[in-house]
Image (cartoon, grey):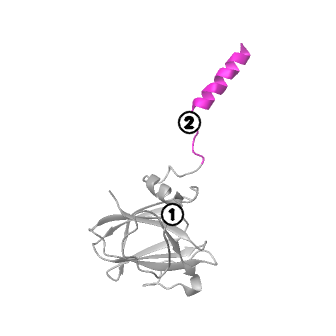
Amino acid sequence: MLRSFLVAVALIALLEPVAADDGCEKFAWSLASERAAFAAADKPAIAAGETLAALPSGALLIRPQPGAQASFAMPPERKPRTEPWHGGMVRLPALSKPGIYQITLSEDAWIDVIENGRYARSVGSTGRGDCPGMRKSVRLDLDASPVVLQVSGVSPDTIAVTFAAVE
């Protein structure tokens, strides 16, 4: 009888969904599509300093420059917390419409968005240190004009980024 009970308990345990052991489901808003974009093998890669002709439809892999060589449109608003670090900027074309845009980063880094010669202000952010391959997401209220995306304080020599209008 005890053996049957133990077998039944084992079978029930197998049927229960496995709980996520990381914080990927604990961001303030869902980042499921960003996580899938970061996992894609065919992400286009660009070097910091380049200008994009169009907004990427998925994740973009940026190769920032070593900190001492990194160039920015405006100085980063925060100094890097780690040494050595990487950084740089990417110029994006005029946005199709004004509204709330979301930028999500795969790695720990500081992000600045510059629009019309000023730092754009965040209207929301969420971040976690316990989600492998995804670190934070920031939302900004932007005009329909070109923007400069700056990252600084990046520890690895690449960082994946998504940039899209919030639906």
> Which circle's residue, 2 or 1, is located before the other in the chain?
2
The amino acid type of the residue labelled 1 equals: Asp
> Which quadrant is home to the N terminus?
top right
| 6 relative to 90, above or below | above
The amino acid type of the residue labelled 2 equals: Pro
Q: Answer yes or no: do the residues labelled 2 and 1 have beta carbons within 8 Å?
A: no
Q: Is residue 116 visible?
A: yes
Query: Which residues are the magenta region?
Result: 1-21
**Residue 112 appears at what percent x and percent y?**
44, 75
**Residue 35 appears at what percent x and percent y?**
49, 56
- Residue at the location (31% across, 75% down)? 94
For numbered disc 1, what is the local secondary structure? loop
Q: On the picture, is 38 further left or further right than 141? A: right
Name the image quarter holding residue 54.
Answer: bottom left
- Residue at the location (34% across, 76% down)? 93
Q: Residues within 10 Å of mark 2 (few under 14, many from 20)?
A: few
Compare residues 37 and 111 and report the one nearer the observer: 37
The residue at which mark 2 appears reads as 17
